[in-house]
Image: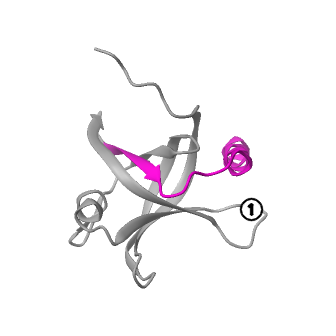
Amino acid sequence: MNSEPRRSSRLTDFLPISVYARNNDDDSQVAGPFSARVVDISNHGACLLMTQVMMESFHIFHSTRENDSINLSLHINTPTDPGPIIISAQPVWLNAAKMDDIKFFKMGVDFVNTIDKNLLRAINRLADEI
């Protein structure tokens, strides 16, 4: 079995973020915020670690995948900027896991627009500061 090579190199960190579901048609918030941590990130996507994937009747993975007009909005707070870094994404995969008595989820997301190297470095620096 051949493994597919990655499109870009990935940086590993545990940066805390907030994840929102947003309607692309009117930019309204559908659900969120969900707390998450970025496990690894590249120019094209990220792996998020989450303890919650449901909010009322909205499932962050399935509800988003079933409706093309909904994107995820990843909000990364920075100590130096007045507002968060916001990256639009689509979920690609979701895996549930359990460690001791703690259930958690890892979710892979693809960014709607590829992020540039400078933004990727800035996000990595934020993770180093935490």
**Relative image position of residue 16 (x, y in whole percent):** 55, 53
Q: Quadrant of the N terminus?
A: top left
Q: Is residue 26 magenta?
A: no
**Relative image position of residue 71 (x, y in whole percent):** 40, 66
Q: Of 1 and 120, which appears nearest the observer?
A: 1
**Relative image position of residue 15 (x, y in whole percent):** 58, 48
Above or below for 73 versus 101: below
**Relative image position of residue 35 (x, y in whole percent):** 45, 59
Q: Residue at x 52, y 45 (%)?
A: 44
Task: List the single residue furthest toward the right.
Answer: 80
Instruction: Indicate left or right for 56 with 125 as reference.
Output: left
Residue numbers of the magenta segment:
104-130
Which quarter of the figure has residue 42? Answer: top right
Query: Which structural element holds mark 1?
Result: loop
Give the amino acid type for the residue marked by disc 1 in the picture: Pro
Q: Which residue is mark 1?
A: 79
Instruction: Indicate left or right for 60 with 20 as reference.
Output: left
